[in-house]
């Protein structure tokens, strides 16, 4: 029962991460990090471009809450925060940092929001269940009994399977999301708690909290392929956008391990603050945010040098398992008049050959589009005539990974992401 999430709750008492200025400067936009502070029931809002805290938002009373996992939706409009003590999921609007909804959960929940935001999954560490949530209406639609103590899951890019770590069984199980049945089981390291799938959607990395190895599972062929020596108390995993490097937060070692994903070896170890409880990579792949629970700060690591280049003070006991850096610009606040723009829908997503772009325009006008990779390089571009609300793009020659589609009108630019399989 000495799992990461229980450990976080104890430590909470003890010491209790794209609005472009222009398309040519793709990632010069307002990337935003959201850091839950487990000591005081708040989250800190960080402007990634300036490495400064712009707001601190009260979520729940500090005496009756332990905020420890967070997920920024991929449209940048919401953040979902799990309360370990209050057994609830809090949803906030990123435009104004106002509460949107609260979803009652099971005991000691953690949260994952699926790509597209139409589904979310709550692992309840204390009652051996995974809840399926309608991400649009914020209601629970099913509860899956999994046994043991489930941790932070990962969903395949096509949305067909959910991988769930079962800490006290030293296993990762696979749930078929059509039938909600467990279809496979993998023995892994001691007390697996955090999972992350690489950008290509081919490998699952398992953070084993009471072990010194990261387990690698080939999710295409359903086999364990590697174990990588890392640090003890693995509390977070994040990949660079190209998938070449993984970063692992080691809560007991006050370090972040740097893994070459081709050789499956640790190539560097970075000293950070006390009890690092989460890591995320910025969308441009240039920086890593390491959240240090015991030091009440976030350290910014330069990917090129693997050196800490900045330290951002946040609230008490920050714990940030999950995806806490929003890769999209914040939407307009509710008191701003919306006179232009588009609601962008991409499907299928993930895509293997042809991507359909559907637009709901606020006003009819001529538009241009560009597809960027995670480095901001333009791969293709073109124009849409007035009245054109759908476009099909051939993407079959693109390499597997994440891409960004920018739609530009008069005085506005909006962006959506898609995954190429």
Image: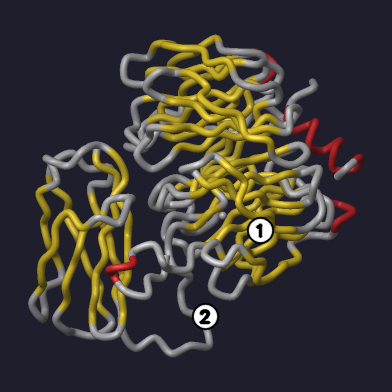
The quadrant holding residue 90 is: bottom right
Frontmost residue, 253 versus 405: 253
Frontmost residue, 25 versus 13: 25
Q: Position of residue 80 (x, y in %)?
A: 59, 54
Q: Is residue 414 above or below residue 76?
A: below
Q: Is residue 346 left or right of residue 310?
A: left
Q: Badge 2: how crowded within 10 Å, few (<14), some, or many (20+)?
A: few
Dot label at residue 155: none
* Residue behind mark 2: 333
Q: Is residue 152 left or right of residue 241?
A: right
Q: Position of residue 76 (x, y in %)?
A: 46, 62
Nearer the camera: disc 1 or disc 2: 2
Q: How many numbered marks appear?
A: 2
Q: Badge 1: how crowded within 10 Å, few (<14), some, or many (20+)?
A: some
Q: Position of residue 318 (x, y in %)?
A: 74, 49
Q: Is residue 107 visible?
A: no
Q: Is residue 205 visible?
A: yes
The quadrant holding residue 167 is: top right
Element type where label 1 sits in the image: strand
Mark-to-mark CA distance, 1 and 2: 21 Å
The quadrant holding residue 260 is: top left
The residue shown at (63%, 44%) is: 290
* Residue behind mark 1: 102
Element type where label 2 sits in the image: loop
């Amino acid at each position: 029962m000495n799992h990461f999430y229980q450990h976080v709750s104890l430590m909470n008492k003890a010491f209790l991460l794209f609005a472009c200025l222009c398309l040519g400067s793709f990632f010069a936009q307002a990337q935003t990090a959201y850091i839950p502070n487990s000591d005081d029931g708040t989250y800190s809002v960080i402007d990634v471009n300036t490495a400064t805290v712009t707001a601190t938002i009260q979520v729940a009373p500090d005496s009756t809450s332990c905020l420890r996992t967070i997920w920024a939706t991929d449209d940048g409009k919401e953040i979902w925060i799990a309360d370990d003590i209050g057994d609830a999921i809090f949803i906030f609007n990123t435009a104004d940092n106002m509460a949107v909804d609260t979803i009652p959960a099971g005991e000691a929940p953690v949260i994952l929001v699926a790509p597209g935001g139409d589904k979310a999954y709550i692992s309840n560490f204390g009652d051996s269940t995974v809840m399926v949530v309608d991400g649009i209406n914020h209601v629970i639609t099913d509860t899956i009994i999994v046994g043991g103590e489930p941790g932070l899951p990962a969903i395949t890019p096509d949305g067909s399977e959910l991988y769930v770590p079962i800490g006290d069984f030293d296993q990762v199980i696979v749930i078929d999301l059509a039938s909600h049945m467990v279809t496979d089981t993998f023995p892994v390291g001691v007390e697996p708690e955090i999972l992350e799938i690489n950008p290509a959607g081919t490998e699952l990395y398992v953070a084993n909290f009471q072990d010194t190895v990261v387990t690698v599972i080939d999710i295409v062929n359903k086999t364990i392929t590697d174990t990588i020596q890392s640090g003890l108390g693995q509390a977070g995993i994040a990949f660079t956008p190209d998938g070449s490097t993984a970063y692992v937060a080691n809560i007991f070692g006050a370090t972040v391990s740097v893994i070459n994903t081709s050789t499956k070896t640790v190539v560097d170890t970075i000293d950070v603050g006390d009890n690092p409880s989460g890591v995320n990579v910025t969308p441009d792949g240039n920086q890593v945010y390491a959240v240090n629970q015991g030091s009440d700060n976030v350290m910014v690591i330069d990917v090129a040098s693997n050196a800490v280049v900045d330290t951002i003070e946040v609230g008490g006991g920050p714990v940030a398992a999950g995806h806490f850096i929003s890769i999209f610009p914040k939407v307009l606040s509710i008191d701003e008049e919306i006179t232009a723009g588009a609601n962008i829908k991409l499907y299928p997503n993930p895509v293997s050959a042809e991507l359909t772009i559907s637009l709901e325009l606020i006003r009819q006008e001529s538009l241009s589009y560009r597809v960027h990779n995670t480095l901001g390089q333009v791969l293709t571009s073109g124009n849409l005539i007035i009245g054109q609300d759908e476009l099909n793009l051939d993407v079959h020659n693109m390499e597997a990974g994440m891409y960004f589609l920018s739609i530009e009108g008069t005085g506005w630019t909006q962006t959506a992401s898609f995954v190429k399989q």
